[in-house]
Image (spheres, rainbow, N blue to C red):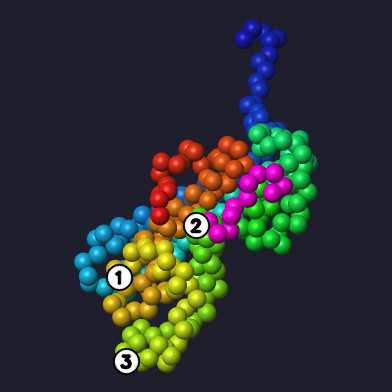
């Protein structure tokens, strides 16, 4: 530099300090992917089972099956709550998150959101369909009943209360036997394969019914129900990009 000249230096500025970013996370997809993962892991244990039962394997298998059931129901709960929340955001922030929904329906759902916590999950789906003037689910249809029983199973496991059941009735008459668990008749009607790790004389619920077949039924029922809901609402489904990786047949 020549005499009398000066050199100016500038420190780099991190502009990220001046930028605010809003993030909106949807967890429904994570739940159904988790349910699918747990079901697959349960299947791998059953497929490689050599008939030699030991406690660690039994615990691991049951964790995967119950985890799949819990995640499948959580998927349904998150799916309908996310839709309600999107319509509220449409009203408060002016961001059109549910683009195919007409403004009147969006407003109705946004207003209903404040009351939605008093309704159960299936009722929320029905309310949305009714407010959108779409065909609601027939409560007698198999898909609806499957999801109702799935939620009942999840609740029975989450809020578990031990009951006396006969592992082996022996020579007792039907009148002398304690009644079967309330979930037994419903789950037997689903006709999924029993847990091969369960002892031959183990009770049906929870030992025999908590199988890969049960987990597969949970994943398929919840996914198909949500899929049918979006079709009835004539809305794009957030599930399209993961459809190929999810079990859709019970």
Label disc, if present, on residue 197 of the rendered structure: 1
C-alpha distance separating marks 2 and 3: 36 Å
Q: Closer to the camera, 117 or 30?
A: 117
Q: Secondary structure at mark 1?
A: loop
C-alpha distance separating marks 3 and 1: 26 Å
Q: Which residues are magenta?
A: 130-141
Q: Secondary structure at mark 2?
A: helix
Q: Is residue 149 above or below residue 9?
A: below
For the residue carrying disc 2, how many other residues have a C-alpha within 10 Å: few (<14), some (14-19), or many (20+)? few
Q: Which residue, given by chain and number where applicable, does mark 2 sit on?
A: 142
Side of 159 relative to 190 (left or right): right
Side of 180 relative to 128 (left or right): left
Point out the tag, 3 or 1, that comes first from the N-terminus: 3
Q: Residue at x 69, y 61 (%)?
A: 119
Q: Residue 56's quadrant in the figure?
A: bottom left
Residue 181 in the magenta stretch? The answer is no
Point out the tag, 2 or 3, that comes first from the N-terminus: 2
């Amino acid at each position: 530099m020549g005499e009398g000249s000066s050199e100016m230096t500038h420190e780099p500025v991190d502009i990220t300090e001046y930028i605010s970013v809003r993030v909106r996370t949807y967890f429904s997809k994570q739940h159904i992917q988790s349910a699918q993962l747990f079901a697959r892991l349960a299947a791998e244990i059953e497929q490689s089972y050599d008939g030699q039962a030991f406690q660690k394997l039994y615990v691991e298998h049951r964790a995967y099956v119950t985890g799949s059931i819990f995640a499948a129901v959580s998927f349904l709960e998150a799916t309908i709550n996310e839709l309600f929340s999107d319509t509220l955001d449409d009203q408060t922030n002016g961001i059109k998150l549910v683009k195919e929904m007409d403004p009147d329906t969006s407003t109705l759902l946004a207003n209903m959101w404040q009351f939605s916590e008093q309704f159960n999950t299936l009722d929320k789906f029905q309310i949305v369909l009714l407010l959108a003037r779409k065909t609601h689910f027939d409560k007698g249809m198999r898909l609806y009943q499957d999801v109702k029983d799935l939620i009942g199973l999840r609740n029975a496991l989450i809020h578990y209360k031990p009951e006396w059941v006969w592992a082996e009735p022996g020579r007792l008459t039907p009148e002398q036997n304690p009644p079967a668990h309330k979930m037994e008749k419903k789950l037997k009607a689903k006709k999924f394969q029993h847990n091969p790790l369960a002892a031959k004389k183990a009770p049906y619920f929870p030992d025999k019914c908590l199988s890969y077949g049960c987990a597969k039924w949970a994943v398929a029922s919840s996914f198909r129900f949500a899929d049918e809901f979006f079709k009835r609402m004539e809305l794009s489904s957030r599930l399209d990009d993961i459809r190929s990786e999810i079990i859709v047949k019970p």
